[in-house]
Amino acid sequence: MWSKGRSEAMLEAGFPVPIELRPIRGAKRLRLRFDEASGALKLTFPLRTSRRVALAWALDQRQWIEAQLARTLPAEPFEPGAVIAIEGLETPIVWSEHEPRTPRLVNGELRCGGPETGLARRIEAFLKRLAVETMSREVAEFAGAAGVTARSVSVGDAGTRWGSCSSQGRIRLSWRLILAPPQARRYVVAHEVAHLKHLNHGADFRALEARLLGPGVAEAKAILRRVGPRLRRLGRGR
């Protein structure tokens, strides 16, 4: 039985910020919003809905949650002297007009020359190329293990999704995954490849996802939840 007292935000497993649960008499659906003033999530739901079911539904909105958090945190533009994540490793951006225009990774640094104007654009283009090359190889690896074929692999920058797989076998992944630790990135790739065979999240899908990635699915998900908000603000303008 729910208490009729005042709701309070609390930390729950899997959520990066406190969440306040508000069962509402007469509510017809579950609703989640992020309150920037308090830094907490507000979850309202019908009185008949159990706490467990409401929290499970809210956890399924984790990509939306990450996107909301990313908007409230300072942007981290690609600029000289900035330190960004590439495959989970902190990597300083070193700019010099004497360096080649095309960015390159050298001894743990991302070096780039040419005019300082346009530096951010060149770095983003470099990261997108690296992302599509890396994840295309991983899609092929996982698809071979699953006995399926991806019709195409592309990268984009969807605000609330790390990846998608169409019924036509087209996989689209966020280029920002190249910034994440490899374990988290490979989890998303394996997840979308598993959708080539099962366009749902049922038991057969989960079994294939686990077989493709191997041990550590839960850990990979936790890593992505932790680093996701920062990945979404890297390269954003101030």
Image (cartoon, rainbow, N blue to C red):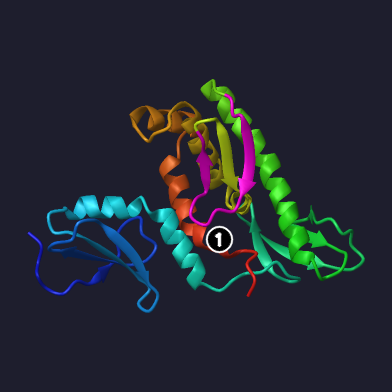
Q: Residue at x 78, y 55 (%)?
A: 107
View extreme (bottom): residue: 37
The amino acid pointed to by label 1 is Arg
Question: Which image quarter is the C terminus in?
Answer: bottom right
In front: 90, or 34?
34
View extreme (left): residue: 1
Question: Tag 1's secondary structure?
Answer: helix
From the viewer's perspective, tell me whether residue 172 is left or right of residue 78.
Answer: left
Q: Residue at x 74, y 71 (%)?
A: 81
Location of residue 8 in the rendering, given as x and y in whole percent from the top left corner: 22, 72
**Image: 18 above or below 175:** below
Q: Magenta segment: does it hold 160?
A: yes
Q: Residue at x 45, y 60 (%)?
A: 66
Residue identified by numbered label 1: 232
View extreme (right): residue: 98
Location of residue 85 in the rendering, given as x and y in whole percent from the top left corner: 63, 59
From the viewer's perspective, tell me whether residue 215 is left or right of residue 9.
Answer: right
From the viewer's perspective, tell me whether residue 60 is left or right of residue 149.
Answer: left
Q: Magenta segment: does it hold 53?
A: no
From the viewer's perspective, tell me whether residue 165 is left or right of residue 57.
Answer: right
> Toward which corner of the image does residue 94 lie, by quadrant?
bottom right
Question: Which image quarter is the N terminus in?
Answer: bottom left
The residue stretch that appears in magenta: 149-166
> Toward which corner of the image does residue 200 lie, by quadrant?
top left
In front: 105, or 163?
163
In front: 16, or 45?
45
Location of residue 103 in the rendering, given as x and y in whole percent from the top left corner: 80, 56
Q: Residue at x 87, y 68 (%)?
A: 115
**Image: 94 above or below 148:** below
Q: How many marks?
A: 1
**Image: 107 above or below 234:** above
Location of residue 213 in the rendering, given as x and y in whole percent from the top left corner: 50, 34
